[in-house]
Amino acid sequence: MERGLPGLESHENLLARAPASFRGATVTSISSTFALGSARKRLETYNVWALDAGSAGFRTEGPEMVLGLTDTKLIVWKTTFWFNRPGSIAGEVPLDKVHDVAAARHGMVTGLAIVFKNGRIVEVEAMRGRRLRHLAARMQELIGAG
């Protein structure tokens, strides 16, 4: 269990942590690799995703993020420039607002879907999904869905 990260209170423990990107990041990156303005296309795709995610209550500050799970909330950190480590807090999601969560592998990408009690769904993904699947399993235990 980790302590001392931004957003963690002194009494909170980090139960799981996983790097992630917005849903569609991998496909957008691959499809725009050989196109002019590929970074712009990726950012445009992220901005559309971020509007929907933000309206659901899932706030981010960029296409790359680190998710952290405590016993009461999901923390969304902006990544640092070097090594993509947790930086400043982009948002927090109280677990009492989450109805269900599911993680699934899709080839070389693992997707995580968070279903909110307001009916909205937010999806993120990771290339190496072991930590994301672990976070989903721990989150599933905490919210009691299943």
Image: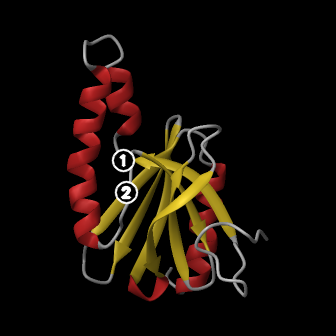
Please indicate whether residue 82 sits to the left or right of residue 88 in the image: right
Residues 82 and 43: in front is 82
Residue 78: image tag? none
Residue 100's spot in the image, x, y percent?
A: 43, 76
Vertical placement of 129 versus 68: above or below? Answer: above
Vertical placement of 90 versus 20: above or below? Answer: below
Q: In percent of the image, x 67 and y 66: which residue is there?
A: 5
Q: CA distance from mark 1 to mark 2?
A: 5 Å
Sequence-wise first label, 1 or 2: 1
Q: Which residue is mark 1?
A: 23
Q: In percent of the image, x 56 and y 66: which residue is there?
A: 136
Q: Disc 2 residue type?
A: Glu
Please indicate whether residue 105 sits to the left or right of residue 131 in the image: left
Q: In percent of the image, x 65 and y 54: which residue is there?
A: 131
Residues 97 and 92: in front is 92
Q: Secondary structure at mark 1?
A: loop
Residues 36 and 144: in front is 36
The crowding category of the residue bearing disc 2, from other C-alpha atoms within 10 Å (few below 14, some 14 to 19, many at least 20), is many
Report the colour scheme: secondary structure
Residue 89's spot in the image, x, y percent?
A: 50, 64
Q: In percent of the image, x 50 and y 79: which residue is there?
A: 146
Residue 123: image tag? 2
Please indicate whether residue 33 sits to the left or right of residue 118 in the image: right
Residue 79's spot in the image, x, y percent?
A: 54, 49
Q: Quadrant of the N terminus?
A: bottom right
Vertical placement of 145 versus 87: above or below? Answer: below
Residue 18's spot in the image, x, y percent?
A: 61, 55
Q: Disc 1 residue type?
A: Arg
